[in-house]
Amino acid sequence: KFSVVIAGGGSTFTPGIVMMLLDNQDRFPLRKLKLYDNDEERQRILGEALAILLKENAPDIEFSFTTDPEEAFTDTDFCMAHIRVGKYAMREQDEKIPLKYGVVGQETCGPGGIAYGLRSITGMMEIIDHMEKYSPQCWMLNYSNPASIVAEACRVMRPKAKVLNICDMPVGTLRRMSQIIGKTPKDLEVRYFGLNHFGWWTSVKDKEGKEYLEDIKAYVAEHGYLTQIEVDTQHTDPSWQDTHRKAKDLLAVNPRYLPNTYLKYYLYPDDVVAHANAAYTRANEVMDGREKTVFDAAKAIVAQGTAKGGEFHIDAHASFIVDLARAIAYNTHERMLMIVENQGAIANFPDDAMVEVPCIVGSHGVEPLAQGKIPVFEQTLMYQQLMVEKMVVEAYQEGSYQKLWQALTLSRTIPSAKVAKAILDDLIEANRGYWPEL
Ligand code: G6P
Ligand code: MN
């Protein structure tokens, strides 16, 4: 049995992940489950509710929550990390500052992602150091954002650390694709290349080797990744609806492969900005929605003294984290899309790029699978974005204003050096205390 710590214990995603872990006890049994956060108050509210839930449903799992790194990381086999440095108040700044200048405001793409990246690096290095100090055998399963910049910072600043970087977006899209062709994700095997939140599927086959790429493309060209139920009922979150519908425009400009929906921020930034509400962004939606629901549910569980009939919902799609932990723990050689050092996986792309490609995961870590050469259109877009991400990490290490200005100027989301500078100066102001001195 395993001992797990969730870093970012006060996150609104934590209850769903804990429920998912409970649901997977036959596949990935726990002896200890700990929450770790530096925000004592937020974590306490969730922790007290989860303590009740665990006592009722899994009394054998030793559960605790702490702000003390020694307690969190001692005797720990896996750290599941989903930290958000600066929380939603800073996400709101990441989204709203660029929008003031007519530029994409998003938490992982463009200037918002860069700003968040510069905050995340410090937080990530801290928890990696705690992990290595108190449990050198521990693996970190990291899905903290912005994943590309975080992964590059780990590669450069902690090259030997046992950190595995993964994003749930490909998992989510594969689920949509499987629904489109009437399969389940586990029936399918994909080929994919890209950077995180920036890539393309080049093949979607079933276990018998039948290729579905053209079928899915034909569907996406018409509906985007909206499944038939969503097309018929329009019942999901409107901003997610828009995102999945937009995939058809991405396919129109580049019909070769199936796009990751995040490419809309780079290929159609003008449309994205035109549809954005600069006074009420995704951070506001989440603060008024998920934040309230989850914390209210936790308080209700504590007030009633029972989690029976409680409002915590299992985050079933987060079970890819269990697949990943199992791959390491039981050497399952599961094939998963991971963010790893390229080293030839994409033949005509830099070896030291952190790319997202299918990998085989086992007890010794991650082995990327060769994806061959990529076409000029995709390669050029990726190279430009890669250099933005690398320069952000260099700017962090060097405390360089100049390099950060250049990185922003190179981002496809920003029209000029002038706009880049104006956004940068505002972001510096907003991120005082979070960013290194520039
Ligand atoms: C997807 C992405 C994550 C991102 C999340 C944002 O799952 O893969 O990287 O953090 O969306 O979701 P939210 O509901 O907070 O906007
Ligand atoms: Mn992601």
Image: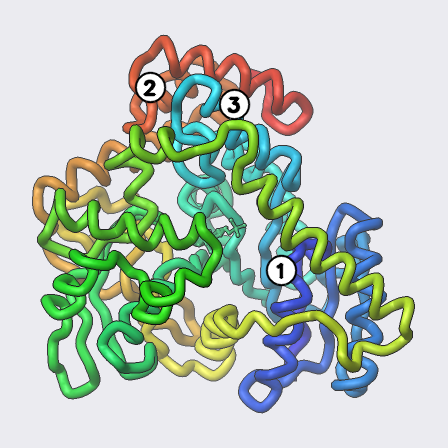
Q: Camera-side residue: 209 or 29?
A: 209
Q: Using the rendered view, name the quadrant where residue 205 is placed.
A: bottom left
Disc 2 residue crowd, few under 14, some 14–19, many 20+, Cα 10 Å:
many
Picture quarter with the C terminus: top right
Image position, residue 274 (x, y; %): 36, 29
First of labels 3, 1 by sequence position: 1
Residue 13 tag number: 1
- The residue to which callout 2 is attached is 409
Disc 2 vs disc 3: Cβ atoms closer than 8 Å? no
Mark 2 vs mark 3, CA separation in Å: 16 Å
First of labels 1, 2 by sequence position: 1
Image position, residue 378 (x, y; %): 16, 43
Dot 2 falls on a residue whose secondary structure is: helix
Mark 1 CB in 8 Å range of ligand 1?
no
Disc 3 residue crowd, few under 14, some 14–19, many 20+, Cα 10 Å:
many
Q: Residue at x 13, y 82 (%)?
A: 209
Q: Residue at x 81, y 68 (%)?
A: 49
In this view, the mark in front (1 or 2): 1
As drawn, is 231 to the left or to the right of 399? left
> Does residue 347 sit above or below 305 in this rendering?
above
> Does residue 253 sit above or below 12 in this rendering?
above
> Does residue 377 sit above or below 201 in this rendering?
above
Mark 1 vs mark 2, CA separation in Å: 34 Å
Q: Amino acid at mark 2?
A: Thr
Q: Residue at x 47, y 43 (%)?
A: 146
Q: Camera-side residue: 180 or 328?
A: 180
Dot 1 falls on a residue whose secondary structure is: loop
Picture quarter with the N terminus: bottom right
Q: Amino acid at mark 1?
A: Phe
- The residue to which callout 3 is attached is 97
